[in-house]
Image (cartoon, rainbow, N blue to C red):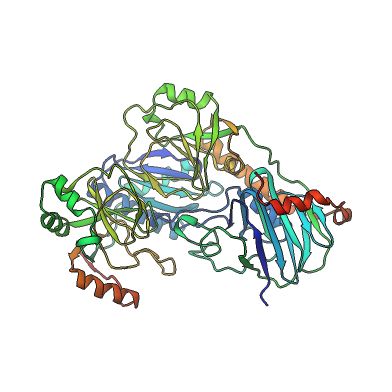
């Protein structure tokens, strides 16, 4: 029998993601990949996977899985509730070995998206060199789509070895970040001076109109100097495009590779993981930085991530004995996605 | 190359190299050539940190890894490439693709004819007579933006986009024509359909048949021929081929 994890109850949009599909944007293939690459990399580190392994991305809400393997070791960027004969709660960034018949529930209660990594990874075939799911084009991941109840996700390993559990000594700070640093351009010159001033001084709010392609922001109208159509050009993740409405759209991992609206600025890559953690109604402000400063921040983030990923230590043995949550826990499972 | 590039920042992982501001074959050809030269230089190890390049109508987006290189260094390297003597460009490829412009496969043909003040047969004749330049791929994997359509067929997009455009639909809007590579919502005018040519297939390398800089000609085929080709395509016997443009 193939080792698998069975989806009992998916989050609003649960997909398999790695760090993206590069090399095919000239052919119109979106990069996709984790919205929060920091969390993905660090959950992988906890279960001993290398940095390129794909994991499950939970886009809003909780995910419930059943273990259909002899055993499996997992870790998540949020607390894991283990259900079964030996109910327990495993903190975020801690590994845990689960056995056949047990269920686990991960709730993305802090950040908008969360990650669950499996030791050894998922037994899926890459598409164009990547395991990332691009739902709109039915590419990659599990059958090119978001997971549904009843799906069986095949695992590379039949069983997890018995060894002491570990945790991240320096977990990342996932609290929502109100300040996003941007590099102005490529088309900021197509906006009025007042629009640029407003963009950099007034608050914006994440609207409910958000998915893996992008999030619409509500805030001051950003006026174009003349018209809002440009000859279509290439788009990078984090680009902030402004259509005729004057309300910006922050483009995320599944964005189209090209587009015809002026882009006022681009969120610097080191702040993109924080964008992935924003939730509808969250407030944010933009601060302009130079390209060189943004590049330096990207290198600092890389150093920081390498250090955190390498700093995996023994978890306190008491974790497994964490008190049962009883009734609350059970009702949480039955009700499924949090409202 | 005689064009002076403008470098526009696209964050800290990409640099837009803009060669002009209009939709023009000559400009597009320069963009594609610059992309080829950067790719060659990167393969030769001369431009560390280049991840990939994306040619569009009038600019090239160069994606890079800020852990390896910088925008400043890349811009200098690209300028040097622009100044260096150009080697022979790759020969242009011409694809002949069958299109049926009839009945339900061409739901907007009558409307286009009405707006263009032409008969449907004239619309078909003019569209099929063109030899189109593939400016770029985008919107959907493998979706080719091609041009230019004859002036009398240039119409704005439909005011209300369709929720479902079938794969293979041949469409026009503004100065461009395209083929929907997958079923998707879309706002262009549908004037014909190609049999299932698999213009994009992720199991193939390269996954897209067309690439920027290619030329495309359409062969008008009857519904009976379309049906025959569709059967052949289903058996995997209809593989588009190209010829070099002299």
Foreground of the two, A335 or A266: A335
At 53% from the left and 58% from the top, the residue drawn is A133
Q: Is residue B41 left or right of residue A40?
A: left
Q: Is residue A215 in view?
A: yes
Residue B85 place in picture, x, y as percent: 29, 52
Residue B130 found in image quarter: bottom left
Residue B184 place in picture, x, y as percent: 38, 55
Q: Is residue A65 left or right of residue B78?
A: right
Residue A234 place in picture, x, y as percent: 39, 46
At 36% from the left and 30% from the top, the residue drawn is A190
Quadrant assignment for the C terminus of chain B:
bottom left
In this rendering, the answer to whether A226 lies above or below A113 is above
Residue A237 place in picture, x, y as percent: 49, 45
Q: What number of labels is visible?
A: 0
Q: Is residue B7 left or right of residue A40?
A: left
At 34% from the left and 26% from the top, the residue drawn is A225
Q: Is residue B246 in view?
A: no
Q: Is residue A152 left or right of residue B93?
A: right
At 43% from the left and 21% from the top, the residue drawn is A194
In this rendering, the answer to whether B229 lies above or below B56 is below
Foreground of the two, A328 or B24: A328
Residue A149 found in image quarter: bottom right
């Amino acid at each position: 029998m193939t080792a698998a994890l069975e989806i009992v109850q998916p989050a609003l949009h649960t997909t398999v993601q790695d760090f993206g599909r590069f090399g095919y944007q000239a052919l119109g293939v979106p990069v996709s990949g984790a919205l929060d690459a920091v969390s993905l990399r660090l959950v992988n580190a906890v279960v001993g996977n290398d940095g390129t392994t794909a994991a499950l991305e939970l886009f809003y809400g909780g995910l419930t899985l059943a273990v259909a393997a002899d055993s499996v070791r997992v870790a998540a960027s949020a607390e894991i509730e283990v259900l079964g004969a030996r109910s327990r709660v495993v903190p975020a960034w801690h590994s845990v070995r689960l056995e056949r018949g047990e269920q686990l529930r991960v709730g993305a209660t802090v950040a908008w998206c969360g990650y669950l990594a499996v030791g050894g990874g998922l037994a899926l075939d890459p598409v164009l060199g990547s395991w990332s799911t691009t739902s709109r084009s039915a590419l990659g991941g599990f059958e090119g789509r978001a997971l549904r109840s009843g799906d069986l996700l095949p695992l590379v390993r039949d069983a997890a070895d018995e060894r002491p559990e570990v945790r991240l000594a320096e977990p990342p700070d996932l609290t929502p970040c109100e300040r996003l640093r941007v590099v102005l351009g490529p088309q900021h010159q197509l906006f009025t001076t007042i629009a640029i001033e407003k963009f950099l001084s007034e608050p914006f709010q994440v609207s409910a109109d958000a998915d893996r392609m992008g999030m619409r922001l509500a805030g001051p109208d950003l006026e174009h100097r003349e018209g809002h159509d440009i000859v279509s050009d290439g788009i990078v993740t984090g680009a902030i495009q402004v259509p005729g409405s004057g309300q910006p759209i922050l483009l995320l991992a599944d964005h189209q590779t090209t587009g015809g609206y002026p882009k006022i600025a681009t969120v610097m890559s080191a702040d993109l993981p924080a964008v992935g953690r924003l939730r509808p109604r969250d407030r944010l402000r933009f601060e302009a930085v130079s390209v060189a400063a943004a590049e330096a921040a990207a290198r600092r983030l890389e150093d920081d991530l390498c250090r955190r990923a390498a700093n995996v230590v023994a978890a306190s043995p008491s974790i497994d004995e964490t008190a049962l949550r009883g009734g609350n826990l059970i009702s949480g499972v039955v009700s499924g996605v949090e409202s | 190359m005689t064009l002076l590039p403008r470098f526009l920042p696209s964050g800290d992982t990409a640099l837009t190299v803009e060669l002009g501001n209009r939709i023009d074959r000559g400009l597009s050809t320069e963009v594609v050539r610059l992309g080829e030269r950067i790719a060659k230089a990167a393969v030769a190890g001369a431009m560390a940190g280049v991840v990939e390049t994306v040619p569009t109508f009038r600019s090239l987006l160069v994606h890079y890894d800020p852990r390896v290189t910088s925008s400043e260094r890349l811009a200098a390297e690209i300028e040097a490439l622009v100044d260096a003597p150009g080697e022979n460009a790759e020969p242009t490829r011409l694809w002949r693709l069958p299109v049926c412009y009839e009945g339900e496969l061409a739901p907007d043909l009558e409307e286009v004819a009405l707006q263009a003040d032409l008969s449907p047969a004239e619309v078909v004749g003019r569209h099929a007579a063109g030899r189109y330049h593939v400016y770029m791929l985008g919107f959907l994997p493998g979706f080719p933006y091609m041009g230019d359509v004859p002036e009398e067929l240039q119409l704005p997009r439909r005011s209300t986009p369709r929720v479902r455009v079938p794969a293979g639909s041949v469409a026009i809007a503004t100065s461009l024509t395209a083929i929907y590579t997958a079923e998707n919502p879309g706002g262009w005018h549908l004037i014909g359909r190609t049999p299932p040519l698999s213009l994009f297939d992720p199991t193939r390398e390269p996954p897209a048949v067309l690439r920027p800089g290619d030329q495309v000609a359409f062969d008008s085929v009857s519904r009976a021929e379309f049906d025959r080709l569709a059967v052949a395509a289903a058996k995997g016997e209809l593989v588009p081929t190209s010829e070099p443009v002299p």
